[in-house]
Image (cartoon, rainbow, N blue to C red):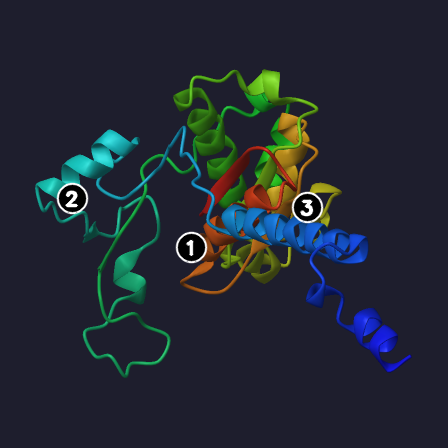
Amino acid sequence: MDRAKERMFHPLATPDNPFAQRLLNALQEARTKIEALELIRSEPLAIVGMACRFPGNVLDPEGFWRILSQGTDAITEVPKDRWDIDAFYDSDPDAPGKMCTPYGGFLPNVDGFDAPFFGISRREAIGMDPQQRLLLEVCWEAIENAGLAPVGLRGTSAGVFMGIGTFDYAALRYAQQDYEGIDPYFATGGVLSVAAGRLSYVLGLTGPSMAVDTACSSSLVAVHLACQSLRSRECDMALAGGV
């Protein structure tokens, strides 16, 4: 009786035991699944398209590489059409309500946007944070840079992961206290979460869609989340970046 119990609880002691063979098969199957999961966690991913906007009149990745390789300084004085620097600049860093430098990194033509191209009315475009406009333009370019037709992605499970953290445009509109200017687009134009959702909506994407705000690391975290989503098969393509 004791030997029978020993065989019951120690099936591997008898390799020719059918129960032992089933257990070995189950262990092998579990090992195969674990190895597959480990492989997925480090599965290589392909970057198939890129697009960007940077100070120094950089409008594409080639231009970005050019200023990097040449060591170009893209910092300039505040453009005259942005704000009156004389009204806000003071060399004294302790001066209240003033900025102590007249320099910064500025994108060109941030006030230009082809709203009809994206099916957006002029009224809605006025209410949109320029960051949302930039994301639409640059993501469209990134898809084309990948050799894909943006309209061909409609209905696919592509995901959107965008780093965005500042809300200067919304703050400016609130400060103006233009109550008559509040319309249905006031909120959607300034809320950060809409930046990602608008991309998914315009392109017709059905995958994960999220705006990420972790301060200066927002873009990097967005790319990290996109990689995780791809490897876990939540989406089969992802738009990842920041603004």
Secondary structure at badge 1 equals helix
Between residue 119 and residue 147, name the one nearer to us.
Answer: 147
Q: Earlier in the sequence, mark 3 or mark 1?
A: 3
Report which quarter residue 196 is drawn in.
Answer: top right
Q: Label 2: which residue? A: 68
Report which quarter residue 117 is drawn in.
Answer: top right
Q: What is the three-letter code of the residue carrying label 2?
A: Leu
Q: Label 1: which residue? A: 220
Determine the residue positioned at 23% across, 38% down.
64
Q: Is residue 133 above or below residue 213?
A: above
Secondary structure at badge 2 equals helix
Determine the residue positioned at 42% across, 55% down.
220
Q: Nearer the viewer, mark 2 or mark 1?
A: 1
Give the CA separation, mark 2 to mark 1.
19 Å
Residue 213 at x, y = what percent? 53, 60
Determine the residue positioned at 56% across, 25% down.
115
Q: Label 3: which residue? A: 188
Residue found farthest to the right: 1
Q: What is the three-letter code of the residue carrying label 3?
A: Thr
Q: Earlier in the sequence, mark 2 or mark 3?
A: 2
Q: Nearer the viewer, mark 2 or mark 3?
A: 2
Determine crowd level at label 3: few under 14, some 14-19, many 20+ residues with C-alpha closer than 10 A.
some
Determine the residue positioned at 50% across, 64% down.
214
| Residue 52 shown left or right of residue 5 in the figure | left
Residue 179 at x, y = what percent? 71, 54
| Residue 18 shown left or right of residue 56 in the figure | right
Mark 2–mark 1 contact, CB under 8 Å? no
Between residue 93 and residue 138, name the one nearer to us.
Answer: 138
Q: Earlier in the sequence, mark 2 or mark 1?
A: 2
Residue 195 at x, y = what percent? 59, 44
Q: Nearer the viewer, mark 3 or mark 1?
A: 1
